């Protein structure tokens, strides 16, 4: 498996992580039979609870965008190890914020795909060639 496979996994993981946000809101509204606008109403939460919800939405969106961009870089052969490391780190952050704040199982799946893509990108990225040692000075 090459960089293109790793990049595609990151892109798909980012899309799933991004889709997890409205899906979680819609499912919560359907399960509790309340309007979706009440889920994001700050009057229904403590200040800390609302801060966790909003920060979770923001972090999931940022993680999704980073996974998509890093995956696109890996797919186009422009990204190497730094893109793969970003995919791994933001895949983990996506999982954490999906489970803590908003996103649930769908966010977990997107984060895992990002981590797998990042790990594959690190393994299949070409190694940096070291410069050959300088030639010895001429004998006199």
Image (tube, rainbow, N blue to C red):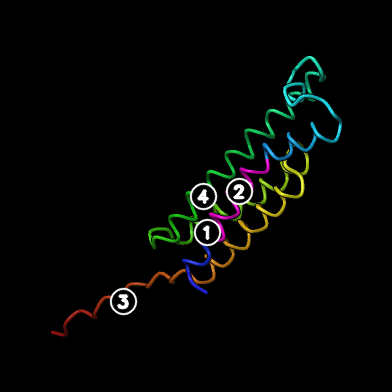
- In the picture provided, is 83 more to the left or to the right than 25? left
Q: Which residue is disc 1 drawn over? A: 84
Residue in the image at 31% along x and 77% along y: 132
Of label 4 and label 3, which has the lower sequence position? Answer: 4
Of label 4 and label 2, which has the lower sequence position? Answer: 4
The quarter in which the C terminus is drawn is: bottom left
Label 2 secondary element? helix
Residue furthest right in the image: 32
Label 1 secondary element? helix
Disc nearest the viewer among 4 and 2: 4
Q: Position of residue 115 (x, y in %)?
A: 63, 58
Residue 133 image label: 3
Of label 2 and label 3, which has the lower sequence position? Answer: 2
Of label 3 and label 1, which has the lower sequence position? Answer: 1
Quadrant hosting residue 75: bottom left
Of label 1 and label 2, which has the lower sequence position? Answer: 1
């Amino acid at each position: 498996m090459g960089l293109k496979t790793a990049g595609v996994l990151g892109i798909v993981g980012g899309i799933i992580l991004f889709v997890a946000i409205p899906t979680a809101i819609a499912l919560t509204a359907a399960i509790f039979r309340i309007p979706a606008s009440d889920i994001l109403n700050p009057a229904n939460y403590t200040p800390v609870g609302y801060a966790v919800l909003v920060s979770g939405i923001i972090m999931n969106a940022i993680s999704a965008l980073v996974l998509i961009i890093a995956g696109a870089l890996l797919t186009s052969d422009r990204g190497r190890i730094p893109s793969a490391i970003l995919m791994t780190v933001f895949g983990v952050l996506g999982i954490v914020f999906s489970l803590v704040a908003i996103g649930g199982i769908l966010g977990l799946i997107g984060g895992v795909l990002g981590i797998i893509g990042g790990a594959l990108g690190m393994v299949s990225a070409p190694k940096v060639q070291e410069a050959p040692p300088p030639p010895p000075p001429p004998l006199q």
